[in-house]
Amino acid sequence: MLKSYLPALVFLVLGVGVGVAFTFANSLLGPKRPSKVKSEPYESGLPSDVRKSFRFGVSFYLVAMLFILFDIEVVFLYPIAVRLEEVGTFALIETVVFIVLLAIAFVHVWRRGALEWK
Amino acid sequence: MDTSWYVVLSAFIFCIGAAGVMTRRSPLVVLLCLELMLNAGNLALIAFSRMLGNGEGQIFALIVVVVAACEVVIGLGIIVGMFRRRLPIDVDQMNELRG
Amino acid sequence: MIELAQVVQAPKIDYQGLAPLFSTIGGSLAVLMIGLFRGRFVQRTLVPAVAALALLVAMGMTIANWEAGDSRPIIEGALAIDTLALFMSMLFYVTGLATVALSLRSDVQREVGAGEYMALLLGAISGMVVLAGAENMVTLFVGFELLSIPLYVLSAGYVRRAHSLEAGLKYLVVGSVGSATLLYGLALLYGATGSTDFRAMAIAIGDTVAVTDPLLLTGVALAATGLAFKASVAPFHQWTPDVYEGAPTPITSFMAVATKVAAFAVTLRLFDYALSDAQVQWGPALAALATVTIVIGNAGAIAQSSLKRMLAWSGVAQAGYLLAGVVVGTQLGLQATAFYLAAYLFMNVAAFAVVIACERVSEHGDGIESLRDLGRASPLLAWPMTIAMLALAGFPATAGFIGKFYLIEAVVAGDYAWLGIVIVVGSMISLVYYLRVIAVMWMGRFEVELPSFPPRRVKAVAGRSPEADARAQPEVASVAILAAAATIFFGIVPSPLFDLVSDVGTSFGGLV
């Protein structure tokens, strides 16, 4: 009976393990170039004190739009996840095709410089 | 609960969206109202799917979600383009083309 | 939780039937990637060549798939091919090839990037092919959006010009209202018939669902409205002239032809197949729409001084003629609509090609003035335009005449004789503006009276040499000449096209 919870446990251990591993790997391996901006509480490209007259930059919208698109596409994986066992190999191939299509879109966006913050 | 209430609610949302598209002047709000119209369709699809007991409506709704996102992103892209050209962002002032 | 009743399995896929779609979608991805390289050769030659190759391959595979008779599923329960889908696909590919040729020298390609431009074009064509073969509401909607969304972007193709951005935004808003209305209509149809599959819908209507079911009728009305937006059927046509004028002209020509063909392909399938048993209910309503469309389109075209706007209004009127073929819901109506769509393609491509050639060199842009004295300056452009205008007006010995004749025959046989009269009267009114164009071209020395709108200052796009003629833009001129030749050819020897559309007529088994 308890055996059926084993995958959940494995999932938990893997999740925690990978998270911890990457946290430490970052501080061990990553380059360290501290600057004033980086030490501010939020460093996601926006000043942390927002004034009334503040306007979002155009780049912000660009990245936000790309985020929405790539984010929402994942919705197509839900039906496959629900019916994975019945559909089997075909679902795997479909998913691979889907990921390749997203990758092509990503390469295009990247090479055209839409991900660079201006 | 009876399915018909969900359909009535979706019809109201659809009408609110349609009215918004026709009366609002800011293209951003027009895009929001378009989302309302599409999501009214989604609500109706899911309500019918539950009533009929088959999953076709749910799959349809998932696809509509993605399509709606695409439309809004294109709309925002064009609006950003107009903003960069410093064009009036107001659908009533768009008179470059004689209507 | 809902228990899904049916057992889910991998669908059966007929890869040979699907091959044309793979070709256009693969071509779209390929040009997108190739377009990332910045060389002049890549941008000006390689990308259009790959796009044209993808279309030609798709065309070849479509011909190989041709087989008369009832529809065969290619993705079980989602896509089917029958002669209607294949015939319409051929029209899309032909229009696509013409658009690739017309865009070669267009600066919109440089502004958007050749790769993106061609990728969007091929994406829109893929959407149209999906739409023509959809046998399920979900596929219908996906195809509808796959065709619309690239066109929103392409209409805004001149990203640095206000009028193009405005056209794109207008098209997006109106198009999305159309999609949302279509979606809501489809949702109601799903609720009424209990299925998203056209075959199951056709069986349910009149059997388990009464044809007067309010949910069904509301659904039909909303779905028809949504499609009417895309086909620019009055009173949902107001966006058409603005968007056609603001969009880059090669895209305008693509929208005017391919989008209309796609909208009618799906209208035929939805109404004459899935909803054919409810024809007594929607027939009179669509007949009224067709009448309004013919009247408004022809009346609107008379007052236009811009060629693109005039062709937009004339396209509205043509949509009315085409709708008449859908109204009767018979095999003859289906054949007549398919025939007229093919004729419509050739006439419009010829006209738009000449408009493109002239607006590039004339200081009047796309105004009718830009054609003044074209008959003397470059007869190679003037003749195709003349043929296109005569064919659109329905002169004998052109494909337009045969098409209209066929349509009138179909509506009279379907007990809508009065609609035939409306078509004839509409064609007579249309002579006013079609003949004016011909007069401007050939009687340049006499002053032809034109609608008195204040002249719009339009900068000539390229070239700017008033002596430039057909020889300066060989690809545009050859598209114009080929399309005009086809218009004449099918006007005098219509039998090859007749054979094709009689195959198309067999697509829906149940039609009389």
Image: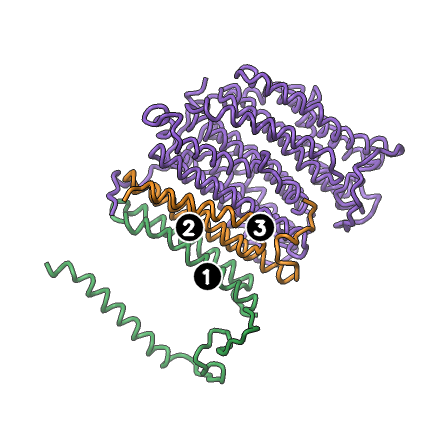
Mark 2 lies on residue: B65
Furthest residue in direction left, as rendered = A1
Give the letter of the chain under mark 1: A
Q: Mark 2 and mark 1 in contact? Answer it, CB < 8 Å.
A: no
Q: Depth-wise, is mark 3 or mark 2 nearer the camera?
A: 2
- Quickly name the residue at label 1: A67
* Tally of marks: 3
For the N terminus of chain B, the quadrant is: top left
Q: Is residue A104 visible?
A: yes
Q: Is residue B44 left or right of residue C98?
A: left
Pick the front one: C213 or C401: C213
- Provide the chain ID for the residue under circle 3: C
Q: Residue at x 83, y 31 (%)?
A: C442
User: Mark 3 — residue?
Assistant: C153
Judging from the image, what is the letter of the chain drawn in purple?
C
For mark 3, give the secondary structure: helix
Check the image and tell me how it is coloured.
Answer: by chain
Measure how far apart labels 1 and 3 are at the Cα level.
19 Å
Secondary structure state at the residue bearing disc 2? helix
* Disc number lying in front (2 or 1): 2
Chain that appears green = A
**Amino acid type of disc 2?**
Val
Q: Position of residue A112 (x, y in %)?
A: 56, 61
Contact flag, marks 1 and 3 (Cβ < 8 Å) = no
Residue drawn at 87 percent across, 34 percent down: C447
Are marks 3 and 2 in one subunit? no
Q: Name the tint of chain B in the rendering.
A: orange
Examine the rendering and report whether any part of residue C123 can be seen: no
The quadrant where residue A19 appears = bottom left
Expressed as whole percent of the image width and height from the top left, the position of residue A93 reads 35, 49
